[in-house]
Image (cartoon, rainbow, N blue to C red):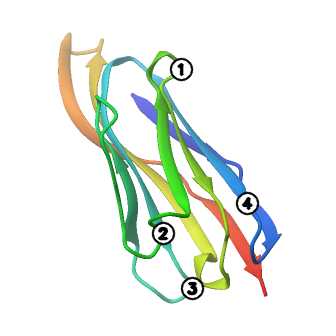
Amino acid sequence: QVQLVESGGGQVQAGGSLRLSCIASGTILSLDAMAWYHEGPGKQRQLVAHITTDGSTDYSDSVKGRFTISRDNAKNTTYLQMNNLKPEDTGDYYCNADLKVWYSATGESREVNSWGQGTHVTVSS
């Protein structure tokens, strides 16, 4: 079993900053690639930032230069530092991760992809 829990959302004015966190818990053998997705009001969920196990990062054009994704492997945590926020950044932010998980009931490990429940960000103009 594995759980991803996001935190750090809130309401800010345009130009402000927020830092989102996502903590993975459970019988985790390894935490591989992690990512943040944005789902704006009435829009599809879209990838905004991605980080590999060795720390290589990639960003959508809409957030490049404003958002920074990072991770702390010792804490099974990924962060999204969001600066110079814009009203179009409003929406729900979801953490996603590729993990290897141990299932004690069956005595086996599995590679899974997991989502958090989301955290809401509102940016007012």
- First in sequence: mark 2 vs mark 4: 4
Q: x, y (%) of residue 124? A: 79, 82
User: Mark 3 — residue?
Assistant: 41
In the image, residue 26 sits, relative to residue 9, either above or below, namely above
Q: x, y (%) of residue 109? A: 19, 19
User: Mark 2 — residue?
Assistant: 63
Q: Residues within 10 Å of mark 4 (few under 14, many from 20)?
A: some
Rendered residue at 63%/49% (across/down): 20
Q: Nearer the viewer, mark 3 or mark 2?
A: 2
Residue type, mark 1 in image? Lys
| Quadrant including the N terminus | top left
| Quadrant including the C terminus | bottom right
Per the rendering, the mark at residue 112 is none
Residue at mark 2 to residue at mark 4: CA–CA distance: 13 Å
- First in sequence: mark 3 vs mark 2: 3
The reply to whether dot 4 and dot 1 touch (C-beta < 8 Å) is no
Q: Quadrant of residue 107?
A: top left
Residue type, mark 4 in image? Ser
Q: x, y (%) of residue 97? A: 35, 42
In the image, residue 20 sits, relative to residue 78, either above or below, namely below
Per the rendering, the mark at residue 75 is 1
Q: Tell me the element at label 2.
A: loop
Residue type, mark 3 in image? Pro
User: Mark 4 — residue?
Assistant: 17
Q: Nearer the viewer, mark 1 or mark 3?
A: 1
